[in-house]
Image (spheres, grey):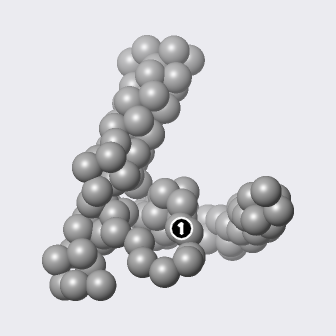
Amino acid sequence: MTFANIVTTVAGGFIFPFLIRLCWGKMVNDFGNIGGWMAASFIVGLSWTINHGVGLIVQTGSAWVDMAFAAFIGLFVASALSGDNVPKGLVNAFYALLGGMIGGFILSCL
């Protein structure tokens, strides 16, 4: 992987949690439940298009990393730095990793 690929991959991984943290709550506050659906469509769709369609994220080898991993790392670090409950977040992270492993296992069986 070249240095340029590393930079674009890190930037692509940063965009998704940044948009979630910046826009999602505001859209829900302004538009209610439909704002959450709009945020999901806009943020996830835009981030996926930029990362995979345009090709900011470059993956080499047989490992497959989902954008949810970038969202978890970015949002967890931002929450920890803002003073949220880290032990509760670690419990949620454990269950998220467990669910991801189960999902990965199911995908590997296909």
Residue 9 against residue 66 in the figure, above or below: below
Q: In this view, does 63 lie to the left or right of 24?
A: right
User: What residue do we see at 44% from left, 22% from top?
Assistant: 38
Q: What residue type is labelled 1?
A: Val
Residue 19 against residue 90 in the figure, above or below: above
Q: In which quarter of the image is the N terminus?
A: bottom left
Q: Nearer the viewer, residue 51 or 41?
A: 51
Residue 35 against residue 66 in the figure, above or below: above
Q: Is residue 10 left or right of residue 72?
A: left
Task: Check disc 1 and report the residue beneath it.
Answer: 65
Q: Nearer the viewer, residue 87 or 94?
A: 94
Q: Residue 102 occupies which quadrant of the picture? A: bottom right
User: What residue do we see at 51% from left, 25% from top?
Assistant: 36
Density class for disc 1 (Cα within 10 Å; few <14, some 14-19, many ≥20) is few
Q: Quadrant of the C terminus?
A: bottom right
Q: Residue 87 occupies which quadrant of the picture? A: bottom right
Residue pushed farthest left?
Answer: 4
Residue 34 in percent (x, y) is at 51, 15
Q: What element carries label 1?
A: loop
Residue pushed farthest front?
Answer: 110
Residue 13 in percent (x, y) is at 36, 63
Q: Can residue 16 be seen in this view?
A: yes
User: What residue do we see at 41% from left, 36% from top?
Assistant: 45
Q: Nearer the viewer, residue 98 or 92?
A: 98
Q: Can residue 76 be seen in this view?
A: no
Residue 14 in percent (x, y) is at 32, 62
User: What residue do we see at 45% from left, 28% from top?
Assistant: 41
